[in-house]
Structure formats: C-alpha cells, structure tokens
Image: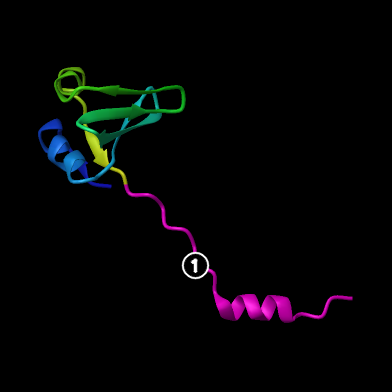
Amino acid sequence: MQKIQIQEGLPALKSGEILMTLQDNQPQFYAYVRDRIRVQNAQSRYTLSVEEWQSLFAGAQFWIYEPAESAEISPEKDAEYYGWNHK
C-alpha cells in the first residue's frame, strides 16, 4: 500500500481512490461521495465536508486502499476435481 499525507489525499479521493487509516488498531476508510468525504469503520459510517475532514485528519497518515485479489478458479483443476470417481 502506498502511504500519503492529507495534501495528496484529497486529489486521490476525488480521482476515485479509497483511503485508509488505522484508528485504535482498526481500519477506517475514506471515500469521496457527492462532494463530501464518507468515513466508515466497523462501528460507524458518516460523512464530512471537505473542510471538516481536512481539519479533523490534518495530522493523519493515509494509505491508498488496494483490495486483496481473490484467487482465480482454474478450469483445469476444477475439471480434475469433478472428474474424480468417489465411492
């Protein structure tokens, strides 16, 4: 994941990126939705104006969120598995 500061965060959000921080060892995510910043974690979800977000998180370090890629299903392994004759 790429670490960025708040100055780089707003342009990244406006370009469609999702940012992440750790608050009390829990991930917190930020997204730009309809001219506001959506803040979401396991316990809550709310929106802030851009000015409020910049004021509240001025000292935070952000990471650009990159979801883990799921494993591709292999047609060869799938055919082999279902080709077994179970007794």
Q: Which residue ends up furthest to the left in the rendered image?
A: 7
- Residue 72 lies within the magenta run: yes
- Residue at the outermost right position: 87
User: At label 1, which amino acid type do we have?
Assistant: Glu
User: What span is in magenta?
Assistant: 66-87
Count of numbered circles in the view: 1
- State the image coordinates of residue 71 (x, y, percent, origin top left): 49, 63
Q: Residue 52's quadrant in the figure?
A: top left
Q: Quadrant of residue 46 in the image? A: top left
Measuring 24% from the left and 33% from the top, which residue is drawn there? 34
Q: Is residue 19 left or right of residue 84?
A: left
Residue 66 drawn above or below residue 42: below
Instruction: Say which element carries label 1.
Output: loop
Q: Pinpoint residue 38: horizontal percent, then vertical percent.
A: 30, 29
- The x and y percentages for residue 61 are 21, 31
Residue ID at (32%, 27%): 39
Is the residue marked by circle 1 packed among few (<14), some (14-19), or many (20+) residues within 10 Å?
few
Report if residue 55 lies within the magenta region.
no
**Based on the displayed image, in which of its 4 quarters is residue 55 positioned?**
top left
Which residue is pictured at 42% across the width and 57% down the height? 69
List the residue tagged with mark 1.
72
Q: Tell me which colouring the rendered structure shows.
A: rainbow
